[in-house]
Amino acid sequence: MQGDQFKKSALLARVLVRTTIARYQTNCQVNPRSLKFKKTIYGKPEVDWENGDKWCPPPLHFNISHTSSLVACGVTVNVPIGIDVEEKQRRLKNKILAFAKRYFSPDEVKLLTAISDPEIQRQEFIKLWTLKEAYVKAVGRGFSAAPFNTFTIRARVVKMGGFHHFDTQHSEASEIVVESSDDPENLTRNWQFALLDLAGSHYAAICIEKENSAGGEAGVPMRLTVWKTIPFVEDERVSGTGAVVPISGLIKQL
């Protein structure tokens, strides 16, 4: 890697992954230093557990994302996870609509086109991008297997039981779902999303596969615990505080 900042970011990401995984479901039997990793055939990293005679490794899954100012690591038990974080002040070199037409589905482009305020349009673009990144990373087959323009992010208003385009400008409780462009009538119900505002500076999107996901159970919130961590220095649970504000998705903070 070129540049000290990139090297420091990569180092912090690796330390965060190791210390985070070691703390969950291992009963202190794993030293973060001893963890080994491997990649799937699609390049997604996962823990390479060594089975012992007296210890069965936990069924943990993880995913990581980082910006220049934040590193995020998501961990689940039994089910795949994808996570993405983006700075709210992120600026695009290209015009938003031109960029969206290249990467987003026609329905998502239509939604962004209908927003007249440039700043709101930019924020909605970033939220959509973050959710789509999290979904592709959770599926774990690479961007070539799930291009952004082949699926649409939508939100289902829970209390009304209907669907509308993804829209975070309204405060109604909503469940985020994925719609395939190849089969618009078939919602991919086995994935669950959360969209969060972190400390007013970042958006974070989390996508996990529902357990027993032959369709999953609708309306069940994602159980989520969020920690603010500097490995070996600071460890503070921030779930339910002003540092973690749900934007969309069914979420229960623990």
Image: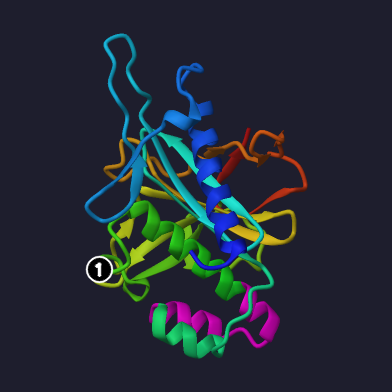
In the picture of the structure, the residue carrying the numbered disc 1 is: 183
Q: Magenta includes 119?
A: yes
Residue at x 54% of width, y 34% of height: 19
The single residue placed furthest to the top in the displayed view is 54
Q: Nearer the viewer, residue 234 or 158?
A: 234
Q: Nearer the viewer, residue 92 or 20?
A: 20
The single residue placed furthest to the left in the displayed view is 41
**Residue 30, percent from left and from top:** 45, 22
* Quarter containing the C terminus: top right
Which quarter of the figure has residue 51? Answer: top left
Residue at x 36% of width, y 38% of height: 79
Res. 77 in view: yes
Along the horizontal axis of the image, is 143 left or right of 230?
A: left
Q: Magenta includes 70?
A: no
Q: Amino acid at mark 1?
A: Asp
**Residue 97, percent from left and from top:** 52, 88
Which quarter of the figure has residue 182? Answer: bottom left
Residue at x 72% of width, y 61% of height: 201
Magenta part of the chain: 105-123
Along the horizontal axis of the image, is 211 left or right of 14?
A: left
Secondary structure character of the magenta stretch overall:
helix
Q: Nearer the viewer, residue 156 or 70?
A: 70
In terms of secondary structure, where does tag 1 sit?
loop
- Give above or below for 244 relative to 1: above
Q: Residues within 10 Å of mark 1 (few under 14, many from 20)?
A: few
- Give above or below for 49 relative to 69: above
Q: Nearer the viewer, residue 231 or 90?
A: 231
Along the horizontal axis of the image, is 138 left or right of 99?
A: left
The single residue placed furthest to the right in the displayed view is 242
Residue at x 35% of width, y 29% of height: 59
